[in-house]
Image (tube, rainbow, N blue to C red):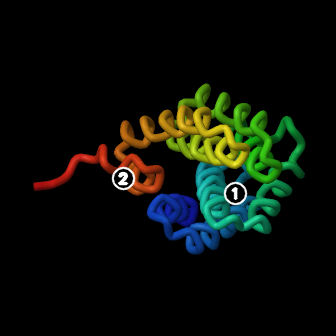
Amino acid sequence: MWCGAVAYVEAHLGNHIRAIELGRASVDVSSSLAFGHPAVKLGANACADAAIALDDRETLELLHGWIADRAPGHRPPSMRALLAKLTGVLERDEAGLLAAEDTYRALGYKPWLASCLEQHAGVLEAAGRHADAEVVMDEARQIYMELAMAPALERTGGGEALPRGA
């Protein structure tokens, strides 16, 4: 189930179209593995992040429906968080993003938390809440720095904090 891991790397590097292709492949094989299989969850999250970056509402709605169609008791916590994140992005709903952030914090999924914070900051910016957005984005940058996620730091304006080679 390499496509989930490769989708994650592609999304992180900014190769969004490829990440969506591989993420959709992860979703497609979920019936053969399991809805909560780690590779499926990784691929779905990568696909979501790439679709958000490209404003690919079709893919976002596909992922949302794919998760929402499962009975609530059959959704692992990380998939419930992804559903909340997708709802937050699709509906510009801060409550959904906050719920996703709470779950990612509780699970200790820092990369997914940072990504969700980044999306949350975008929703706040769109609502004209610039100061609030900057606080949220600062937290995302802090996590990206801690995890040495250079492409994410550069994308979010924190690239100047990266150590430079000699």
Quarter that holds the C terminus = bottom left
Quarter that holds the N terminus = bottom right
Q: Residue at x 42, y 35 (%)?
A: 142
Q: Residue at x 72, y 67 (%)?
A: 56
- Which residue is label 1 attached to? 33
The single residue placed furthest to the left in the displayed view is 166
Q: Secondary structure at mark 1?
A: loop
- Residue 128 sits in quarter: top right
Task: Please name the amino acid that badge 2 sits on.
Answer: Ala
- Which residue is label 2 attached to? 150
Q: Nearer the viewer, mark 2 or mark 1?
A: 2
Tell me how far mark 2 sits from mark 1, CA to CA.
32 Å
Q: Position of residue 136 (x, y in %)?
A: 56, 35
Q: Residue at x 89, y 42 (%)?
A: 71
Task: Please name the amino acid that badge 1 sits on.
Answer: Leu
As drawn, 18 above or below 48: below
Whichever of labels 2 and 1 marks the residue nearer the N terminus, that label is 1
